Amino acid sequence: MSQARRVAGSAALVLVDGVTPLRPEPALFEAMLEGWGRQQRSRRLSGPLVESRERLVRRFQAFTMAWPWAWTPEQVEAWSGSGRWAHSTIRSYQGALAVFLDYACDARYGWLAECEQRVGARPAQVCHEWNTAVHVADYEGRAERRPLTRVELQAFFDAADDRAEAAASSGRKGWLAAFRDATLFKAVYGWGLRRREAVMLDVCDFTANPAAPELGAFGACQVRFGKAMRGSPPKRRVVATVMPWAAQAMQQYMAEVRPRYGCDAHPAVWLTERAARISARQVDDRFAQFRVLAGLPAELSVHCLRHSYVSHLIEDGTDPLFVQQQVGHSWASTTATYTTVGADARNRMLRSALSRAFEADGGGGDGRR
């Protein structure tokens, strides 16, 4: 038995001997995708990842209206420029296409010979360094979704606090709303919340955590309106409090500010002067005001605070799996797209790694065994 017949995902294990389809091109393409799926699953890749890659290859085929053995680098360039995709998204799409073609062109799987025999052409790799997007920055997503630096974050919170204090000291109308908004954004960052998740918080969603009794009634935050898959109900999760100062800010707001709205019967945490739940639009407007006061770039959005939560926890050495569970991501790859580790954090990690290496070497320094 040849090597191709022994490898998971090989043509010999997918194609049925003695069967000649009426339309060989689509049948061969489907067989290649089936073999690729088997090859990926044999490497223990997750089902959703395999399925998303297959959908991507099908989209490219539909765009080109050609089969893999007729694809060209020029088609990759045209396809990459056909949508308003973020740089990181284009890299991901091109990467999936390149992986498929690497598989199809690998002689171990037998597709080169099968394609040449059945359709008279062979697939070739069409994703090259000169026609694909490159990794050019630490953060390649949309600018309005990037994490804030710690300096930017502090400037934002200082601007929010200054606005609340100025309104309270002057006795002007609206100081309750200013204090509310400052606390709301601290909660968004302190528990890594999405905008809608924060807006929909009820008083009962903050609870004690037996593992952290020192945090009192704010040891955990129950998120009831997490982002859902299409056609599914909102995802729920419980976020453990990891920033004590956020719990203190919430405790002060709930004890001193929220009661002044005179709406004790209303379940919402964030109330308006008209005894209603604050809206997402109001959150965006207040964020924009504080952003201007802090002198931050205009492209930053509320969601940047959630990205900041993830990046700063990773920088501080928090287990990535714990961070993933905190923010409610199903896949670690999603959490990774949120993460930007600053230069200072990288230097600390480097020194820590070197220290461990020297300690294991007994102080010798060359590290050789």
Image (spheres, grey):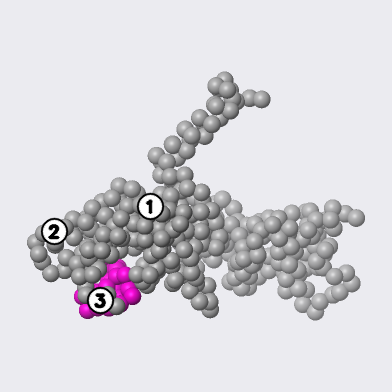
The span picked out in magenta is 266-286
Badge number at residue 263? 3
Whether tag 1 and tag 2 are in contact, CB under 8 A, the answer is: no
Q: Earlier in the sequence, mark 3 or mark 2?
A: 2
Asked whether residue 282 is drawn in magenta, I would say: yes
| Of the two numbered discs 3 and 1 in the rendering, the one whose residue sits closer to the viewer | 1
Observer-nearest residue: 118 or 328? Answer: 328
Residue located 26% across and 59% down the image: 252
Where is mark 1, residue-wise?
214
Instruction: Indicate which disc, 1 or 2, sits on the residue closer to the N terminus.
Output: 2
Tell me the mark number nearer the camera, choosing from 1 and 2.
1
- The stretch drawn in magenta includes residue 346: no
Q: Residues within 10 Å of mark 1 (few under 14, many from 20)?
A: few
Residue type pointed to by label 3: Cys
Among the 4 quarters of the image, the one containing residue 97? bottom right
Q: Which residue is mark 2?
A: 166
Circle 2 sits in a helix, a strand or a loop, which is it?
helix
In the rendered image, is residue 140 in sight? no
User: Which of the two residues, 181 or 224, is positioned nearer the viewer here?
Assistant: 224
Asked if one can make out residue 350 in the rendered structure from this viewpoint, the answer is yes
